[in-house]
Amino acid sequence: MNLATWTLRNPIPAVLLFLMLSLAGLRGFQQLSIQSLPDLDLPAIIIKLSQPGAAPAQLETEVARKVEDSIATLSGLKHIRTSITDGLVQISAEFVLEKKLSDALIETKDAVDRVRSDLPTSVQQPSISAVTVGGAPILTYAIASSKLDEEALSWFVDDTVGKTLSGVAGVGRFERLGGVQREIQVEVDPVRLASLGVTATDVSRALKQVQQESSGGRGNLGRAEQALRTLATVRQASELAALPVALGNGRDVRLDQVATVRDTVAERTELALLDGKPVIGFNIYRAKGHDETRIAEGVQKALQRLRQADPSLSTTLISGTVDYAQEQYRGSMTMLYEGALLAVLVVWWFLRDWRATLVSASALPLSILPTFAAMYWLGFSLNMLTLLALAIVVGILVDDAIVEIENIARHARMGKSVRQAAAEAVDEIALAVIATTLTLVVVFMPTAMMNGISGMFFKQFGWTAVVAVLASLLVARLLTPVLAVFLLADQQHPEAADGQLMRIYLRIVHWTLTRRKTTLVLATLFFIAACALLPWIPAGFMPAADRGYTTVHFELPPGSSIVDAGKVAEAVRATLKPVAGIDHLFAAVGSSQQFGGGGLRRAGEVREGTLTLTLSARNERSSQTAIEQAVRQALHHVAGARFSVGVGGPGEKMSLILSSDNVAALKASAQALERELRGIRSLSNITSTASLERPEIVIRPDWQRAAELGITAELISETVRIATSGDFDAQLAKLNLDNRQLGIRVRMADAARRDLQVLANLRIKSASGLVPLSSVAELALAGGSAQVERFDRRRYVTVSAELGGQSLGKALAAAKALPAVANMPSGVKLIETGDAEIMVEMASGFLWAMLTGLLCMFCVLVLLFKDFFQPLTILSAIPLSIGGAFIALLVSRSELNIPSMIGLIMLMGIVTKNSILLVEYALVARREQGLSLHEALLDACHKRVRPIMMTTVAMIAGMLPIALGWGSDTGFRQPMAIAVIGGLLSSTLLSLLVVPVVFTYVEGLQRGLSRFGRQEPALAAEAN
């Protein structure tokens, strides 16, 4: 008595078990978070080291290399990326996935502490933190007010909006875009300062000493204890003008005698425009592990409360991943329902019995609901990959129930009662059902256990599919027989005569069995011909997604001002206005940019900006790819900037890293590669991160003259810096208001900074009084590097190109064939990064997963059938399915990418199920009925073709809506469905004919080896 027959005698435990599992699944479904993709918990640590005033080249030598060498010894380190700008070093240490984030953080801190004493004393305390927030913002809003000016609105966003939205559960970071910062500016007059014998540095430092609050000491008045505080601050900016500033030597001066005090805004470094009108924007970043849709709901409610409190406020949603995640969720659930409905209709069409159809259909919810419970317990989310796993197995989930119901119905037609038919049928089919399910499990299991980035992506996919398939086996073995007994009518069903199709099929099988070599040769030729099509199928990474928005990043030549960038943004807006399908255009100039992976963010530059294009509803416009192509064409008419189009998602760009310690060779190689890539017509917007030379005013001291006057380079640098841009923020005097603190910046007026003669006449303090800067130094115009980037302790340049719909594999092959790559200097190394690196890793991971799956299937089949030979017969259907998949991909013009590889892996399990049904019954017919090989195979084909066709048509029906692209954006799922349907069609039609032929050859091989094994002992005995 097996488990299935035991449940027939004891149905209550099985019913209660699935009742509890279903309730747990409903609860788990409610708790599951909705996301676009699974969280990639990449162990990455960010190290920030600040040395105000230091140049990038200086920081590279004195700081970056020392820290890199220290952390390079850490175990599990994968990559080190370093970005060096004026006064700041940012290092991203990326570890292998097996490394615990907490261990990586502790070890990195220890490594930095080991070299802390070797760093310059002026380097501030390092900031070391783990990356806990996803890379891209999930929401971008623009906010405007009819009564607040830009400064007031900027402070409102920083103070009120930022605090309110940061309190929403799941918000990891809030970032303002555009706007200004209020500050007190003290514009000194160089002539007046010179007449008094003081410098801007003296005024700034003296002002800080006067304008401050400090505490210390205690008093004991009236037998009580009091704290002592020194309050030397003014209450408002206007009071600063009359403030006496001590200049030393017993002298002082009123501030308004040497400077003009203004309560204004700091020098603009950011700009935000919505459809050409000034606004303030802000980004919302999701903390890992939280539901994007719930965050969006919380943010919307919080903004609604702010608008109700102040009706002058208006907010506009610019872009984000939330709508796309919700759309993918709704689309996937719709596909799940449609696939389930079509699968049920197929079952009814074959069985023509609503009771049997109901029993088979019950396997769908009873398999999926426990899967939701397991997903919640495992910490998964409802994302593109887990929903894809459910969508692709929806046709499989009814397979086991279909096979059992069909076998029960066949036994009932022999004149048996429903209970007897159920008991004998489930016992007869037990091995086949268990074998088919376990082969699917061992196919999907390797995808859940892949290493690297691919493992992070497909862990949830693999385990979701495995749990769902195991749940369907549990339903088939425990509940389907019980439901069949209670729902199927206990009637006598005479065996129906074979129809015309069955008779034709059996005649074809008889023909193939009598012409085995011809059949085998034709099948082999089909497989070879299909594989010959492989070079014609483009290789890609991920299909382009239609997210409802796209971006245009632009970059102006070094030295351009924020006014120039604003004019370019307006020119782009005017140029793109005729492009159909664009609702809004949001421009953000000077905002920080994420780059290079590992959580590194590059400080914004006023010469760079990003325009976010909000697209119309999908049914009212062309595809996002078509709109992006139209945008690229339109941008050809905008001069003075270089552009890149796209949100930076997978499959959009090709990135190549050139790495070297030889800066000259690196720069030359990058320029050559960039130039030759422009010759590949399919690529567009070729860009390079090679630091362009920015214009600089270089001050070269006359060391002899400076030494005679007691003037140091540090003094010159400090005097010039404070006079032109003010002191460092931490060194500024502060004005305390009720709710914030404003910096008091001392510097010259903007007009003075435009005159090189004024800079040359700046006074420097010497041992003999003030002397002009030009008397101790030479001023000249030159160029210098604005930024240094390093990869794995070597300088690097990233050359990127937009694919524009071309496959990544084809673009990579074309790039590697260029002379710039073939003739690259030995000191320069080419590294594939970004999508190219992930594509290679995933392709390798999937190849190993497929090979592992094949080996595991063979082992499972050997264990179940207790035979090493017939599993070869079962696996012979796999090549037939791969051929059909390749043909389908070529005909549909799809890529061989990650989704289609998922389809190939899925095919391995599905076609094996069909072979198992044939082979298992043929073995049973020979063993229990004593039929000849030919008769057993014909009987197996006769008895098993119906359930095989039912399961195949049910799976194709479940995949059909995805393959046709119905509903929401199906760019990711469609290649997978096309590959599966093509493989199913070819494998089902051919395996029903070829597998019996292979069975005869394997049987003959087995008999030959057994005769050889018997003869060898006989010969040995005769020799003795």
Image (cartoon, rainbow, N blue to C red):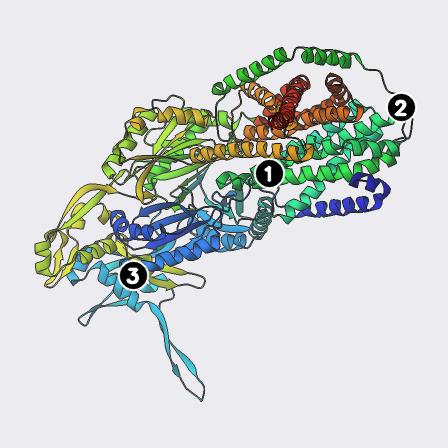
Compared with 983, 272 (above or below) is: below
Q: Which residue lies furthest to the bottom in this view?
A: 223
x, y (%) of residue 876? 61, 23
Q: How far apart are marks 2 and 3 (CA)?
A: 90 Å
Which residue matches tag 1?
445
Q: Which amino acid does label 2 sit on?
A: His
Determine the secondary structure under disc 1.
Answer: helix
> Disc 1, disc 3: CB below 8 Å?
no
> Disc 2, disc 3: CB below 8 Å?
no
Which residue matches tag 2?
493
Compared with 448, 909 (above or below) is: above
Query: Quadrant of the rendered structure where residue 389 is?
Result: top right
x, y (%) of residue 376? 64, 47
Residue neighbourhood size for the residue with mark 2, other residues' Cα within 10 Å, grouped as few (<14), some (14–19), many (≥20):
some
Q: Residue furthest front?
A: 1024
Q: Which amino acid does label 3 sit on?
A: Ser
Q: Distance between the residues labelled 1 and 3?
A: 50 Å
Determine the secondary structure under disc 3.
Answer: helix
The one of 441 and 101 positioned closer to us in this rendering: 441
Q: Is residue 637 visible?
A: no
The one of 876 and 910 positioned closer to us in this rendering: 876
x, y (%) of residue 341? 73, 29
The one of 580 and 23 positioned closer to us in this rendering: 23
